Each structure stands twice: as C-alpha cells, then as structure tokens.
C-alpha cells in the first residue's frame, strides 16, 4: 500500500491535523485507457452525457442511465459537458470556447470566444455558468457578461446552496498542497472544506446534491500507478478510496446514490457506475 495523503481538516475555523493513508494497488499496468470520458448525469436522472474519444466516433454522446440507447449528440470537438438544471440544455467547451446545445441536438449557440475557456458548470438556478479560464469566471446568461471572480483555482462547480466549490493547488517537486474551498459568486472566500498534502495529481471534483461528500480523481505523480477515485465525507472528515483498478472523471447521480466514472484499466476506457460507497460496480458503456 502507498501513502499518498496527509490531511489537514478544517474544524470550526481551526485547522486540525490527521494522517490519512490512501491505499493504492501495486502497478498492474502502466498504460491507461480513456475512451469515454467526462461523464455528466442529467438532473432528472435519465441521461448521461460524455465525450467519446474513439477513432471515427469522436464527439459528445448521450446514453440512458440504464446503459441503453447510446446516441451521438454532436460530432467533433466537445468536452467538459454539464447539464442545465431543467435537463434541456448542455454546456461544453470546444477549441477553448464555451457553447450550449439542446439535449435533442438543436440550437447550438456559442457563449464565449476565448481560447482558454474550459470546465463549465451550470448553476442550480440556471442563470450562471462558472468555468475555468486562467482564473475562475462566471458568465451571467441574461446579460452574456463574464467576470473573473478568482485568479487562482480549478475545477469549479456548484454547492447546493449556490456557492462555488473549487480546488486550489500549490505544487512542489514531489507533492502538492490542495484545498477544497468555497466562495460566493462575487469571489469572496467562504470556507476551506478540506486541505491536504498529496503525492498525487488530484482533479475533477464533484459534490453530491446534498453537499455531504466530494469525489475526485488522484493519480500518483510518478505515473507508475493508475488514477483512482476517492471520496471525502464531510461529517466524518474521512477520505476513502473507491476504486482499485483505475478510475477517473467521477460525477454524482442527482440522488447521490451512484457515481459514474471512466474505468481506466488498460483495454477498457468505458463508463462504469458504482454505488456511493464504491460497491455494485457495473459497466455502462463499451468503447
């Protein structure tokens, strides 16, 4: 087992130290497969959107949450899909700009014209999109005005209360200091939920809809170990590894009972679904 994490959990404004060992299997393979990636579950629970990187089939695809009826939404460039709260639209990044498209494939609309706009997330009230573009920015859809709310931070998303959750990282030679933090839509820092030191590259965080747990991926800086999915539970202040055979790009189901992710084991690269505790894994798509 490999120790990848030392945690600094914030308790009532004070920082307490606790040791955390995150198990990582011995390297079974050095090459990972990532074909169906960056899945996003529709708020109505019916559909999962993802990017297909398979040769000859590149584009944004949809699949029923049962695994049936996989279909192409948009061919070509498109990644980082996220649903509108009414499940009628999706926002995504293509060539460094943001676009939205209806879930039936109609009404493709360009929202930004930068070359650095990625990782969008639609607010729960449907009025804003937060995204990464050098710093963290918010696009207000009513005025089409974009403003930077923080110069640092990555993987922005929304909390159930309407604040912005993001990952802050300070990378050293062989490790990094990370923190999951929240801020309001004006960029005022509100809280550090969880701070930790790790020898892994941590990314792609997703908070469940009750705001009680965050999943994210972690891949050891050495590159000798596959990415795995971990879950931080706020009430228990505990960190648990959910996968052991390769996992990346996790996203919660709207009911908080399941997690969709990419199984990165060599020769796979498809989407899988597991329970919130990492059990009951089943295949969703076959690349």
Image (spheres, rainbow, N blue to C red):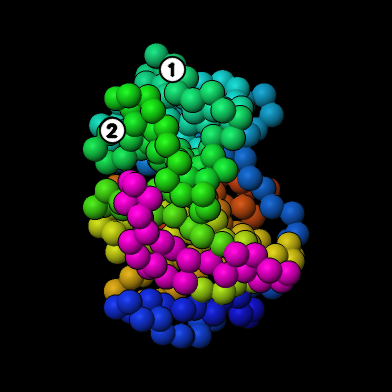
Q: Quadrant of the N terminus?
A: bottom right
The residue labelled by disc 1 is 109
Q: Position of residue 271 (x, y in %)?
A: 51, 45
Q: Is residue 175 magenta?
A: yes
Residues in magenta? Answer: 170-195
Mark 2 surroundings: few (<14), some (14-19) or many (≥20) residues within 10 A: some
The picture places residue 124, in percent across and down from the top left corner, at 27, 41
Find residue 263 and report its horizontal and vertical position in percent: 56, 52
Is residue 118 on the magenta stretch? no
Closest to the observer, 74 or 100: 100
Residue in the image at 53% along x and 53% along y: 152
Q: Tell me the residue that label 2 is attached to.
A: 127
Q: Determine the secondary structure under disc 2.
A: loop
Q: Is residue 115 above or below residue 178?
A: above
- Residue at the (53%, 66%) spot, across then down: 178
Quadrant in the picture for the C terminus: top right
Q: Is residue 167 left or right of residue 220?
A: left
Label 1 residue SS = strand
Q: 101 or 139, which is in the foreground? A: 139
Residue 228 occupies which quadrant of the picture?
bottom right
- Asked if residue 251 can be seen in this view, the reply is no
Q: For the residues marked 2 and 1, what is the alpha-carbon distance in whole angstroms? A: 16 Å
The spot of residue 17 in percent (x, y) is: 46, 85
Mark 2 vs mark 1, foreground winner is 2
Please identify the quarter of the rendering in which residue 97 is found: top right
């Amino acid at each position: 087992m490999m120790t990848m994490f030392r945690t600094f959990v914030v308790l009532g404004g004070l920082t307490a130290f606790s040791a955390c060992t995150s198990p990582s299997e011995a390297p079974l393979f050095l090459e990972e497969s990532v074909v169906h990636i960056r899945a996003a579950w529709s708020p109505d629970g019916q559909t999962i959107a993802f990017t297909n990187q398979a040769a000859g089939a590149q584009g944004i695809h949809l699949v029923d949450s049962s695994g049936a009826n996989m279909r192409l939404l948009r061919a070509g460039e498109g990644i980082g899909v996220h649903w509108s709260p009414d499940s009628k639209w999706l926002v995504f990044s293509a060539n460094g700009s943001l676009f939205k498209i209806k879930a039936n494939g109609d009404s493709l609309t360009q929202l930004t014209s930068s070359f650095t706009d990625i990782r969008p997330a639609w607010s729960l009230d449907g009025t804003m999109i937060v995204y990464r573009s050098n710093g963290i920015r918010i696009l207000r859809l009513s005025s089409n005005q974009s403003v930077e709310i923080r110069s640092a931070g990555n993987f922005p998303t929304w909390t159930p209360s309407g604040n912005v959750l993001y990952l802050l990282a300070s990378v050293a030679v062989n490790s990094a200091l990370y923190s999951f933090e929240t801020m309001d839509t004006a960029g005022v820092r509100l809280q550090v939920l969880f701070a930790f030191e790790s020898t892994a590259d941590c990314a792609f965080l997703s908070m469940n809809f009750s705001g009680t747990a965050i999943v994210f991926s972690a891949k050891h800086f050495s590159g000798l170990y596959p990415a795995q999915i971990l879950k931080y539970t706020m009430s228990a202040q505990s960190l648990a590894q959910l996968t052991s055979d390769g996992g990346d790009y996790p996203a919660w189901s709207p009911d908080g009972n399941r997690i969709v992710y990419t199984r990165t084991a060599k020769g796979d690269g498809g989407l899988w679904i597991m329970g919130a505790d990492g059990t009951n894994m089943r295949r969703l798509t076959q690349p």
